[in-house]
Image (tube, helix red, strand yellow):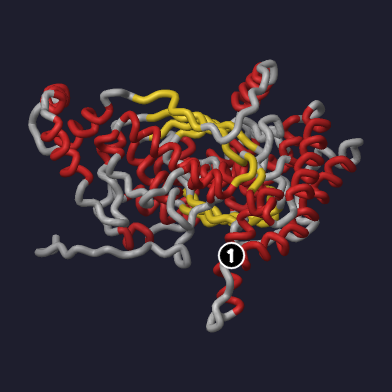
């Protein structure tokens, strides 16, 4: 035994070891006195595969698979399919931005379900009309933005284009259909990836099922054992089909720009404050909460300042704020939802993308003299959606542009609310998301002003003003 033990922190590098071997190396440390380097030197890819077959597959020690990490590139998949890809909470994603990149005419997915059917022509015409209107809208909307934000004499043209691009492309993206092709990068461990593959293989859309098969084949090049048993899940298929049939019997309600706080715990502030004290006390939680509830308002204010008052710009609130819950129902445009879905530290239940709830009209479209053409393209898409929806509502969703509204149910804690509301209310955020974030913050502050008052929101920002300034119609 050595006389001294020196701390060491080092990487097990994927360029030298396969992801499955790294996973076994970490797994073996629970019962081996050897260093990680020594364990890894004793392993081979074959030995690692045998380990995973026995312990992960055979005995269900799935946490071992979390040490095998893969980086997967998806190219030219529909934005509708990306919703499924990104629906896994414990993974990381970066996707092609509709705020900073432009789409080419013709860059949309044609699903296998419509090929060689009477719906194929309807589908293609609707997508062509949307992308043609998108391309045509770029210059007139850009001209309005240029007039409001002119280039300075010393400003480089390329730098100027970068400065204003998000301002006009942000608006034109309302015309992009869910069929529009995009790229996305995903980083996930093998346990998460297996779950993602199972969901994709059980999805009602053929494109997503095909992506699931390709992901499985691709992942097996690096993790041949850990994902090879990923397969479709009859439970997901059956419950989705049954619920879809029952849900279609309920009449749609058309309303836009609505954000409701449906449920919250009235005593959540005392609960959070008591939780913050809990780790620093030897008393039971019940007695601590009773003590907090018995405090004067001044004492509670002082305690709240101790919990949140010293935060600086980039500090995350303490985790004790997670001892709370809020359930919201929101109706927002699909473009905004596509950004909101990235906030995965909450529970989101979106309704299927449809043309049932109407569409938003950005004010810049009106100011650019493009409103009539915008509405024509949106109505064309809506009519095509209705024709396909009666045949296959899942496929019809490909035709729905970003500007159409979608209803969403979400449950989140106060810590996540701080993150979402602060990030998405910032002046550089998309105006649709700014409106939603400020609506949510306002409603949380109404019921829990003591803690929500510490949210670091832009001064004098108001969702009503943002709505008036940026929308002709919501």
Nearer-the-camera pick, 455 or 470: 470
- Residue 439, compared with residue 26, is above or below; it is above
Res 473 → quadrant = top right
Nearer-the-camera pick, 215 or 247: 247
Residue 388 falls left or right of residue 168: right
Q: Is residue 175 visible?
A: yes
Q: Is residue 225 visible?
A: no
Image coordinates for residue 23, horizontal then vertical, percent: 41, 51
Nearer-the-camera pick, 394 or 122: 122
Quadrant location, the N terminus: bottom left
To which residue does mark 1 refer? 148
Mark 1 burial class by Cα count in 10 Å: few <14, some 14-19, many 20+: few
Farthest residue toward the bottom?
Answer: 154
Which residue is at a point 66% across and 44% down the rendered structure image? 361
Residue 438 falls left or right of residue 381: left
Number of marks in picture: 1
Quadrant location, the C terminus: top right
Residue 335 falls left or right of residue 346: right
Which residue is at a point 70% across and 30% down the rendered structure image? 356
Image coordinates for residue 136, horizontal then vertical, percent: 77, 59
Which residue is at a point 86% across and 42% down the rendered structure image? 115
Image coordinates for residue 231, horizontal then vertical, percent: 61, 36
Which residue is at a point 46% across and 33% down the rendered structure image? 347
């Amino acid at each position: 035994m050595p006389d001294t033990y020196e701390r060491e922190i080092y990487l097990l590098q994927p360029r030298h070891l396969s992801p499955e071997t790294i996973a076994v190396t970490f797994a073996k440390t629970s019962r081996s006195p050897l260093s990680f380097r020594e364990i890894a030197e004793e392993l081979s890819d074959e030995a690692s595969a045998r380990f995973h077959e026995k312990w992960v597959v055979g005995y269900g020690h799935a946490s071992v698979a979390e040490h095998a990490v893969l980086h997967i590139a998806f190219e030219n998949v529909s934005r509708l399919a990306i919703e499924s890809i990104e629906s896994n909470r414990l993974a990381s994603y970066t996707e092609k931005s509709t705020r900073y990149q432009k789409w080419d005419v013709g860059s949309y997915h044609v699903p296998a379900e419509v090929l060689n059917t009477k719906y194929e022509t309807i589908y293609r015409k609707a997508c062509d009309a949307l992308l043609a209107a998108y391309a045509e809208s770029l210059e007139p909307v850009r001209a309005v933005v240029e007039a409001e934000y002119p280039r300075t004499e010393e400003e480089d043209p390329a730098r100027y284009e970068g400065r204003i691009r998000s301002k006009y492309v942000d608006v034109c993206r309302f015309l992009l259909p869910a069929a529009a092709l995009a790229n996305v990068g995903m980083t996930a461990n093998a346990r998460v990836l297996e779950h993602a593959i199972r969901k994709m293989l059980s999805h009602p859309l053929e494109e997503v099922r095909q992506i699931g098969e390709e992901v499985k084949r691709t992942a097996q090049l690096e993790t041949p054992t850990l994902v090879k048993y990923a397969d479709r899940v009859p439970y997901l298929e059956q419950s989705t089909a049954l619920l879809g049939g029952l849900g279609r019997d309920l009449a749609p309600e058309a309303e836009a720009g609505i954000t409701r706080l449906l449920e919250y715990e009235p005593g959540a502030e005392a609960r959070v404050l008591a939780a913050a004290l809990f780790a620093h006390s030897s008393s039971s939680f019940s007695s601590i909460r009773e003590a907090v509830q018995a405090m004067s308002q001044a004492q509670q204010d002082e305690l709240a300042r101790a919990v949140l008052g010293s935060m600086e710009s980039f500090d995350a609130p303490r985790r004790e704020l997670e001892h709370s819950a809020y359930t919201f129902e929101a109706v927002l445009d699909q473009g905004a939802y596509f950004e909101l879905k990235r906030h995965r530290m909450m529970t989101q239940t979106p309704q299927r993308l449809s043309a049932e709830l109407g569409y938003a009209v950005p004010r810049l479209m009106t100011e650019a003299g493009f409103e009539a053409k915008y509405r024509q393209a949106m109505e064309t898409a809506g009519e095509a959606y209705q024709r396909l929806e009666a045949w296959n509502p899942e496929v019809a969703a490909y035709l729905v542009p970003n500007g159409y509204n979608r209803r969403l149910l979400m449950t989140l804690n106060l810590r996540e609310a701080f993150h979402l509301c602060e990030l998405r209310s910032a002046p550089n955020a998309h105006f649709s998301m700014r409106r939603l974030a400020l609506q949510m913050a306002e409603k949380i502050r109404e019921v829990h002003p003591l803690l929500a008052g510490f949210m670091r929101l832009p001064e004098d920002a108001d969702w009503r003003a943002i709505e008036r300034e940026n929308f002709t119609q919501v």
